[in-house]
Image (cartoon, coloured by chain):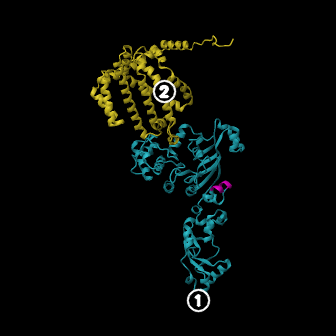
Chain colours: A yellow, B cyan
């Protein structure tokens, strides 16, 4: 009896999660259907809108954004990148990917900023959310693809769901950090004039925190983009799907084109959101 | 003089259960003992004093003395753990949230050490903030803000951002922002400490100037003794959370309550605090211009002095007669008005020692001190000027004239 092997004690944690997921899928069907409806509509609406824009106009818009937030040269470079993606024959796929990312990021902000604010103000919220955020960031993403399919079936909505879980933490964390990092005296001065808590938050704390929050938005966007290929495993279309197809077909050419397109998008989105962050930084409070 | 703020037994304790330390304070335990026993820090220890309407009340102390904690009790940025603060008779520590908001919006405004400006707003938007949150219409608040920007001399900078301004200018914005709320009371938490000495001096004068015009009650925090005594009508000295002494600068310098305060005020530039009236001597011998030379000589003999001031019937100074001139005059059968010397130096009783020094050096006679009605109230010898500058001989200055 040297107790070498682990005793015969089993705790099937996975089974309970399985039960929970089935329970939720069965009982909250209406809710999931609603979420599915709204999300899929906004993705397709966004894609349709982006597809209406003439290709040359889109390139000009990207150029102008690059010029305004970075530099003239960057603007030209980003325009060329977009043009190249078009020449690969991946224009529509690019638009779908942009729609998915945009939708995911917008949902992230809608959920993430209020949660971040709540964390900054309430230590209980903070204590509960912290480990959850850690889990969201470290849990391998394939694991939550499965319940995503359960709730929303195969397709773009499941992809968004998976993307959310992966890319939500930075915006929450950085909002929390940003609000707590606002100069104490500045907040005191807002209070000293008799501001309500809402006025202090909207007129002083959020604007002061904006530069740091924008850094969170940038990270969230980049992480959403990083999920594109994995998300295509649950049926997301767009550039990620092309990468997946090229793996299945061992199509090096397509793989490269789709891959490099994702890189181009990543560079453009990163630089532009970074540029926005720097612009607001100049006027913002805490650095 | 009406009392505007009454501070009654205010204590502020920091820690997990602040209330638990109150009984210990009531028992009179020291800050260190309470820290040891309960692990609570006493910020303000049983403070009681009154602040009059329209005065500049300075709270002075070194860092960690609790002065910033105390000033934040007046607008409840810090809620006192115990005690009450009556503002025009209303106990603000018992205010509801809405009442407190009203008090902050209408009665009290604050100026901060590091300005506390909103860096994302223009100067104009900073200054009108107080009115904006009270939902004052845009036109109206613009107008009021504009006036106050002009009051502090920042006209033309309305559309700049705080980081485009120098420290001194930023604090002017802080002041304008506080004034825009038209408060009765202005709290100033070391407002000029972050500024360099030259700007600081300028801002102090300007504050006094503004105070003269607007007659606000100002509670002013500083760690700088010279600043405190220069601008304060009354000064409270704090140490380790205790208010050690409250009084006018002259009272504190003349009668420091304890060793600590004497030590504290040792470095003060007394020549800028003490006025002529504090160091002068009341004349025990005076001669009327109707008197004859014999009377003058008699007066000087009796008092053992070598010269005597001549005044008219309403005590207005006419000149001085020396003993030599008087004796010479009698020999030559002259009258008092023939030998009177008019080249004396007359100073106002409110002049600071600092300004008296050159006058005392130049004059060959004692300085004649007059009040605002030009009546002679005392005289100052050179030795008085010197002794007024050292702390050891304060008894010299006991003869107040008022």
Closest to the observer, B221 or A5: A5
Give the alpha-carbon distance from disc 2 to disc 1, as whole Å. Answer: 107 Å
**Chain letter for mark 1:** B
Relative horizontal placement of residue A263, taking residue A179 as reference (left or right)? left
Q: Which residue is mark 1?
A: B332
* Residue occupying the point 37% across, 21% down: A43
Q: 10 Å neighbourhood of mark 1: few (<14), some, or many (≥20)?
A: few
The reply to whether the magenta stretch includes residue A36 is: no
Quadrant for residue B342, please give it: bottom right
Q: Is residue B358 visible?
A: yes
The residue tagged with tag 1: helix, strand or loop? loop
Do the dots labelled 2 and 1 sit on one chain? no
Q: Is residue B252 above or below residue B145?
A: below
Q: Are marks 2 and 1 in contact (CB under 8 Å)?
A: no
Q: Which residue is mark 2?
A: A169
Q: Is residue A25 above or below residue A131?
A: above
Q: Quadrant of the N terminus of chain A?
A: top right
The residue tagged with tag 2: helix, strand or loop? helix
**Residue B18, x across and y down, in percent:** 65, 38
Residue farthest right in this picture: B27
* Residue mark closest to the camera, 2 vs 1: 2
**Residue B332, x across and y down, in percent:** 58, 89
Closest to the observer, A211 or A242: A242
Magenta range is: B257-264
**Residue A203, x across and y down, in percent:** 45, 37
The reply to whether the magenta stretch includes residue B263 is: yes
Tell me the chief SS of the magenta region: helix
* Residue occupying the point 72% across, 43% down: B27
Relative horizontal placement of residue A159, taking residue B183 as reference (left or right)? left
């Amino acid at each position: 009896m040297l107790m070498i092997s682990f005793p015969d004690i089993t705790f099937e944690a996975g089974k309970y999660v399985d039960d929970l997921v089935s329970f939720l899928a069965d009982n909250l069907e209406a809710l999931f259907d609603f979420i599915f409806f709204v999300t899929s509509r906004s993705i397709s609406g966004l894609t349709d809108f982006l597809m209406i824009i003439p290709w040359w106009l889109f390139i000009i818009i990207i150029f102008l954004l690059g010029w305004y937030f970075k530099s003239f040269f960057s603007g030209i470079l980003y325009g060329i990148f977009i043009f190249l993606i078009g020449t690969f024959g991946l224009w529509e796929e690019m638009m779908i990917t942009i729609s998915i990312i945009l939708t995911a990021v917008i949902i992230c902000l809608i959920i993430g900023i209020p949660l971040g604010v709540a964390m900054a103000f309430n230590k209980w919220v903070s204590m509960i959310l912290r480990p959850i955020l850690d889990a969201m960031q470290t849990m391998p993403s394939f694991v939550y693809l499965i319940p995503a399919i359960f709730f929303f079936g195969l397709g773009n909505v499941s992809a968004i769901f998976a993307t959310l879980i992966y890319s939500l933490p930075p915006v929450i964390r950085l909002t929390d950090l940003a609000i707590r990092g606002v100069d104490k005296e500045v907040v005191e001065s807002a209070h000293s004039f008799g501001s309500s808590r809402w006025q202090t938050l909207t007129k002083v704390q959020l604007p002061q925190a904006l530069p740091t929050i924008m850094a969170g938005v940038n990270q969230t966007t980049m992480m959403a983009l990083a999920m594109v290929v994995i998300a295509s495993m649950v049926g997301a279309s767009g550039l990620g799907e092309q990468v997946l197809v090229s793996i299945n077909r061992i199509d090096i050419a397509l793989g490269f084109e789709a891959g490099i397109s994702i890189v181009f998008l990543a560079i453009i989105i990163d630089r532009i959101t970074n540029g926005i962050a720097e612009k607001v930084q100049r006027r913002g409070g805490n650095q | 003089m009406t009392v505007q703020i009454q501070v009654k037994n205010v204590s502020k304790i920091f820690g997990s259960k602040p209330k638990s330390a109150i009984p210990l304070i009531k028992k009179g335990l020291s800050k260190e003992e309470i820290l040891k026993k309960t692990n609570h820090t006493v910020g303000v220890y049983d403070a009681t004093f009154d602040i009059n309407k329209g005065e500049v009340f300075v709270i002075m102390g070194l860092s960690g003395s609790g002065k910033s904690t105390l000033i934040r009790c007046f607008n409840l940025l810090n809620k006192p753990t115990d005690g009450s603060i009556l503002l025009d008779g209303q106990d603000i520590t018992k205010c509801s949230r809405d009442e407190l908001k009203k008090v902050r919006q209408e009665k009290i405004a604050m100026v901060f050490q590091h300005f506390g400006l909103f860096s994302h707003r223009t100067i104009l938007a900073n200054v009108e903030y107080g009115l904006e949150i009270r939902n004052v219409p845009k036109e109206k608040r613009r107008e009021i803000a504009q006036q106050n920007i002009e009051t502090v001399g920042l006209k033309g900078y309305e559309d700049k951002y705080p980081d485009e301004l120098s420290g001194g200018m930023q604090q002017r914005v802080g002041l304008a922002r506080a004034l825009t709320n038209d408060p009765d009371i202005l709290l100033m938490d070391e407002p000029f400490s972050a500024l360099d000495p030259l700007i600081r001096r300028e801002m102090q004068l300007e504050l006094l100037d503004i105070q003269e015009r607007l007659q606000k009650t100002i509670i002013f925090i500083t760690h700088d003794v010279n600043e405190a005594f220069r601008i304060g009508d009354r000064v409270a000295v704090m140490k380790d959370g205790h208010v050690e002494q409250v009084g006018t600068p002259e009272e504190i310098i003349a009668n420091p309550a304890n060793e600590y305060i004497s030590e504290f005020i040792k470095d003060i530039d007394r020549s800028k605090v003490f006025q002529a009236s504090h160091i002068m001597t009341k004349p025990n011998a005076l001669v009327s211009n109707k008197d004859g030379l014999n009377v003058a000589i008699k007066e000087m003999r009796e008092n053992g002095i070598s010269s005597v001031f001549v005044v008219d019937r309403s005590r207005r100074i006419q000149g001085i007669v020396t003993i030599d001139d008087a004796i010479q005059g009698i020999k030559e059968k002259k009258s008092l008005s023939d030998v009177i010397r008019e080249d004396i130096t007359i100073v106002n009783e409110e002049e600071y020692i600092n300004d008296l020094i050159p006058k005392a050096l130049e004059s060959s006679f004692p300085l004649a001190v007059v009040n605002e009605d030009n009546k002679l109230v005392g005289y100052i010898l050179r030795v008085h000027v010197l002794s007024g500058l050292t702390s050891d001989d304060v008894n010299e200055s006991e003869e107040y004239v008022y």
